[in-house]
Amino acid sequence: MGWLRRLFHKRLAEKRLDAELRFHLEQRVRDHVASGMSLEEARRRAHLAFGGLEQIKQDCREARIENHVEDLLRDFQYALRSLAKDRRFAVIAIVALALGIAATTVMFSVIYNVVFDPFPYRDFQHSVTFEMRDLAGTGDAVTRNHYTIPEFLAIREQNHVFEDIIGNYQLDVLYTDGKGTRRLRGGYVTTNGFDFLGVPPLLGRVFSADDEKPSAPLVFMMNYGLWQTQFGGDSRILGTTFFLNGKPRTLVGIMPQRFNGYDAGIWFPLSLRPGADGTVFHVKDANVIWTLARLKKGVSLDAAAADLDAIVHRLAQASPGELYPQQFKIVTRTLLDFVFGDFKKTLYALLAAVFMLLLIACINVGNLLLARATVREREIAVRASLGASRGRLIRQLLVESFVLAAAACVTGCFFAYFGLKGLMAIIPRGAIPEETVIGLNPVVLLFALAIAALATVICGLAPALYAVRGNLQLSMTGSGKGTAGGFRHGKLRSGLVIAEVALSIVLLTGAGLLMRSFFVLTHADLGFAPAHVLYAEVAPAADDRYDATEKKVFFEQVVQRVKRLPGVITATESLGLPPLGGAGSEITVLGKPNPEHWNSMVDLCSETYFQTLGLGLLRGRLLSESDINSARHVAVINQAFARTYFGSENPLGQKIKFNVFDLLPDTPRDAYFEVIGMVPDFRNRGLLSPPEPEAFIPHSITGLGHRIILARTAVDPKSLLADVQREIWAVDSNAAVVQSGSIQDLLAAEAYTRPQFGLITVGAFAGIGLALVLIGIFSVMAYTVALQTHEIGVRIALGAQHGNVLKMVLWKGLRLVSAGILIGVLASLSLTRFLEGQLSGVSATDPLTFLAVVTFFLAVGLLASLLPARRAAGIDPLVALRYE
């Protein structure tokens, strides 16, 4: 570290260097004197042999590290002084780069935490799930990813590829505390489930094998969020007994804040022995178990899939039935792929967009630096004539770029901190697990530094190389404004503007397509009026106090009480929640043999269902009160049902059997329902999917399952939610409202949030990019006008009209913009196809969007050129002729 001491003790180092060199010189003089020379001749010969003392000192200095460090520090000092003199340029450059660095840092932070550090679980990179896919179906549609208990046991015992495997399923848990009943999100999980994830509890213990013994008491565990929100973080509740789903259970453990395994707030231990708690279901061969497994070391996804495929095919051969398609395969997926799915594609698309924004910012700053270097050509030539090498000049200019990039990095991290908070506020719920913590961690900050270094090279290298290329001697004889260099570098500046415009066109086109898609989504014709429709999913008491008949009475009483609320126009009950879907069944049409499986959606509803949704009648009649009271086997169908299964025949009087009823308890067996009416189609499988065949039958045929109360209101539906809750508890305080709200809010939460997220983020990036491009166009045109002031003055002096000068400058700007638009449109045609998965109801090459983007950009491009053009048209020729 001697160089460091010399750096801070320069005078001492110089004195020692001088003493050392003089010692060697005197030694050589003494040698010559000893050989017989006179002192004067010896000194002359020594100086001739030794060379110039000062030159040797300089050579020694240049061989030392501290000299280069000192030169670099001088470069930094000069860069700071130079940028301080041109504060407007420095502020514009720093803000432009800071926006690009901030946006890139924010997106990298999200992707890093999502892809590399999303879970606190042990070895989650090797955790996989698996699903069955029907090879006879279209595409890669999943047939099922849940399995029966016998299937799970067979896979656990017969596989050769897993270190461990767990099973779980979710259910609604009704919690009664004496004040009322609340619905909690719960789940059963095999007793190895928490050891599998490797996260110790915050309080208490996790499940063990003892909890699945026949004599074991009923226990449960709770997550951190539920513990905080419902019980105020009170540690004394550990060991307390709660009534959950009508059974007393003891709380044995509370998990830490970042644990949200198995997507539940309450966990029950799942014993897989016959008849154990959590293994009794309403239907035979219930495929409810979702599995998670850890691969053995060295086992690939394909190898695991092949092993599981053999096991499941053996099960299918031993027990053929509806559980297994005729041809199927097992596909394995990593836990990351299962959890994040298509949302990773959205994030990668946003990362690509933000890198385009960063490139726009770098090009913009590079263009400003190039224009600045053009003005400084004489200064650079003078420095070269005084002995500065081209390498030294390039280093000086790169140091200026680095100072800008470093300041932009600090500012960008500041922007990123707040930008990340804003981004997290609009990320769709459920798209990122609750376990994932997104923030500016050390890795992200190192990435920001790397981006700053990259920006230094991108922004500064081309201007630095162009500033020192060619004959610098000619620059000393040119204009002080860099006129000669301005024309020499004009093509590069124009090329950079064209590149900016092209990148901005790609971003704007992506934002325009997402905007069009969002508009189509939010203005989709649902086929019914969702405004002022309230919904409340109701779960009756879970302690088996109700049989099917009593459940029917319970829901009828609730509907009647809701109807009488002030502000409610009408109310009904149903099984499904339009337009997001409902139950389905295979069907049999009497007298119509069907070699293929025919399927239809089926809804259990009351007679006021159609009035509540605002559906008219096309043929026949609607359900009546007497149909409901007598549980008559009648059905109203939609147009899609009639079109699909009856064609041109009259559907009225046809008889339909819903085969699912033969499998469920407390439902009519081998029952055919007569078609009595037909209603118009409405969306029943999402906002943009075409309506599927659906039948509406009296809810009174069964009391099975939860029901949804729908009410059309004359006031804001949300203002009535508390009243509806009160009316439900007035009928039975042990019933729970699973979820409630207005259908419009439900659509906003379920269908609009993810497209809205993409639109806001890409739109923000496109807007920032557009602003940067406008700055770029304006700066290039302004510099062009400044460099051509003399020429413009000559033109005006020779008779050119101000309007002609205005058109000339605008035409130059328009040519740059048009070239960039052309390249950008061609690039967009090939790149926007990656957005197809994010678009709904609009093509990735939608001509209206492309036309709107081109028109808009032409307008703003001309606007950016207008001010420099007006300045050019207002030049005084007498002043311009003296202009340098």
Image (spheres, rainbow, N blue to C red):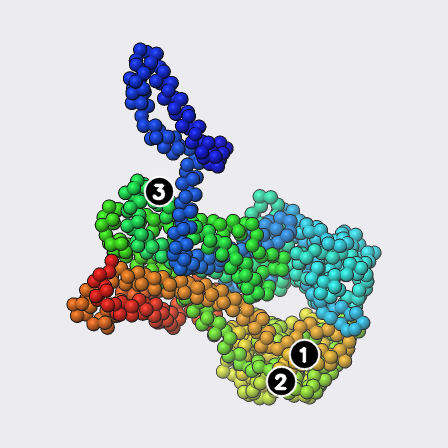
Of residues 668 and 608, the one nearer the viewer is 608
Local packing at callout 3 (Cα closer than 10 Å; few below 14, some 14-19, many 20+) is: some
Of residues 1 and 599, the one nearer the viewer is 1
Of residues 811 and 89, the one nearer the viewer is 89
Q: What amino acid type is highlighted by mark number 2?
A: Val
**Residue 806 percent across, percent down from the top left:** 26, 70
Quadrant for residue 260, please give it: bottom right
**Residue 249 percent across, percent down from the top left:** 80, 62
Q: What amino acid type is highlighted by mark number 1?
A: Leu
Q: Residue at x 35, y 45 (%)?
A: 394
Local packing at callout 1 (Cα closer than 10 Å; few below 14, some 14-19, many 20+) is: some
Which numbered disc covers residue 129? Answer: none
Kindly identify which residue carries mark 2.
715
Local packing at callout 2 (Cα closer than 10 Å; few below 14, some 14-19, many 20+) is: some
Task: Give the distance between the C-alpha atoms of the residues marked 3 and 2, in whole angstroms.
Answer: 75 Å
Viewer-nearest of discs 1 and 3: 3
Kindly identify which residue carries mark 3.
392
Q: Secondary structure at mark 2?
A: loop
Quadrant for the C terminus in the image: bottom left
Kindly identify which residue carries mark 1.
721
Viewer-nearest of discs 3 and 2: 3
**Residue 242 percent across, percent down from the top left:** 80, 64
Decide if residue 597 is in sight here.
yes
